[in-house]
Image (spheres, rainbow, N blue to C red):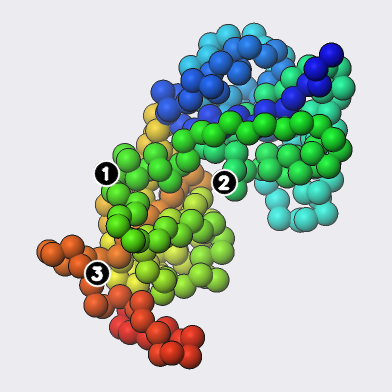
């Protein structure tokens, strides 16, 4: 008998039409669907997926209680518990589809389960979904990177550790908890700022400058900071992207 597989399946950022054909097929072809949270039907990932795969509502839904806390010991215990829940189905020879928002390789909680399950000898496969920052940039009609521009993807909680002195585009994921701090730094940087709140969902809101973004924007708020350019498409000299040769950044913010 073939060994059962656990699939980390990205469902995209919110718009059910952005789910991949592979994600839809795997959900349809398998009966055990693991969903983050104590109540699977209340999960955002489930609510996205069920719109593209209505039969999901009839599947065996397995809750994965993954707390949103920073206590590492508590998190490790929760990850171990959830990995054991998934393993119990794999041991029965049943594949498990683990739904995850966006893409399973970008700041995904599933990656912690992946490491534990692989260490225990279970096969894991990952199914890409549309990342939230790609969907947000498309909705805002903002190219994320052109020519030789680097792209920096930063969890907003670590924004203070990554000052905006590097060139290219900066994306701040899940900015709500650090909104005031990130907005202040972005204003000082002189960059052009965009944001998307609840991208692809019914309550989506788009912002085209830093002053439009409310301080109380929701949890699923993503910010994009672009270098300013002149009419010839050249980078503005006002951006602090040079160095004094000793590792210190210089220039006027």
Q: In the figure, is residue 223 to the left or right of 57? A: left
- Can you identify the residue that label 1 sits on? 141
Can residue 242 be seen here? The reply is yes
Q: Report helix, strand or loop for mark 1.
A: loop
Percent x, y of residue 158: 56, 64
Instruction: Name the quadrant containing residue 237.
Output: bottom left
Q: Are marks 2 and 3 in contact (CB under 8 Å)?
A: no
Of the residues under marks 2 and 3, which one precedes in the sequence? 2
Residue lying at 40% horizontally and 85% vertically, measured from the top left: 243
Tell me the quadrant of the picture where the N terminus can be found. Answer: top right
- Can you identify the residue that label 3 sits on? 235
Residue lying at 36% horizontally and 77% vertically, measured from the top left: 241
Q: Report helix, strand or loop for mark 3.
A: loop
Relative to 183, does residue 130 appear above or below in the rendering? above
Q: 220 or 141, which is in the foreground?
A: 141
Relative to 26, does residue 191 appear above or below in the rendering? below
Residue 106 bears which disc, if any? 2
């Amino acid at each position: 008998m073939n060994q059962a597989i656990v699939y980390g399946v990205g469902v995209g950022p919110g718009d059910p039409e952005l789910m991949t054909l592979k994600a839809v097929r795997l959900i349809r072809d398998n009966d055990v669907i693991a969903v983050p949270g104590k109540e699977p039907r209340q999960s955002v990932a489930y609510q996205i997926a069920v719109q593209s795969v209505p039969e999901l509502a009839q599947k065996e839904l397995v809750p994965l209680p993954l707390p949103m806390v920073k206590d590492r010991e508590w998190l490790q215990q929760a990850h171990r518990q959830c990995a054991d829940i998934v393993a119990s189905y794999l041991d029965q020879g049943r594949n498990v589809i683990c739904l995850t928002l966006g893409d399973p390789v970008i700041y995904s909680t599933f990656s912690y389960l992946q490491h534990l399950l692989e260490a225990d000898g279970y096969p894991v496969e990952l199914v890409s979904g549309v990342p939230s920052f790609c969907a947000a940039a498309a909705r805002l009609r903002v190219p994320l990177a052109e020519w030789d521009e680097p792209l920096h993807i930063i969890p907003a909680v670590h924004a203070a550790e990554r000052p905006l002195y590097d060139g290219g585009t900066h994306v701040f994921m899940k900015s709500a908890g650090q909104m005031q701090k990130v907005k202040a730094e972005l204003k000082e940087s002189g960059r052009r700022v965009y944001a998307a709140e609840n991208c692809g969902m019914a309550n989506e809101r788009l912002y085209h400058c830093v002053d439009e973004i409310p301080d109380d924007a929701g949890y699923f708020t993503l910010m994009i900071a672009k270098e300013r350019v002149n009419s010839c498409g050249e980078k503005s000299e006002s951006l602090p992207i040079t160095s004094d040769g000793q590792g210190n950044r210089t220039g006027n913010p």
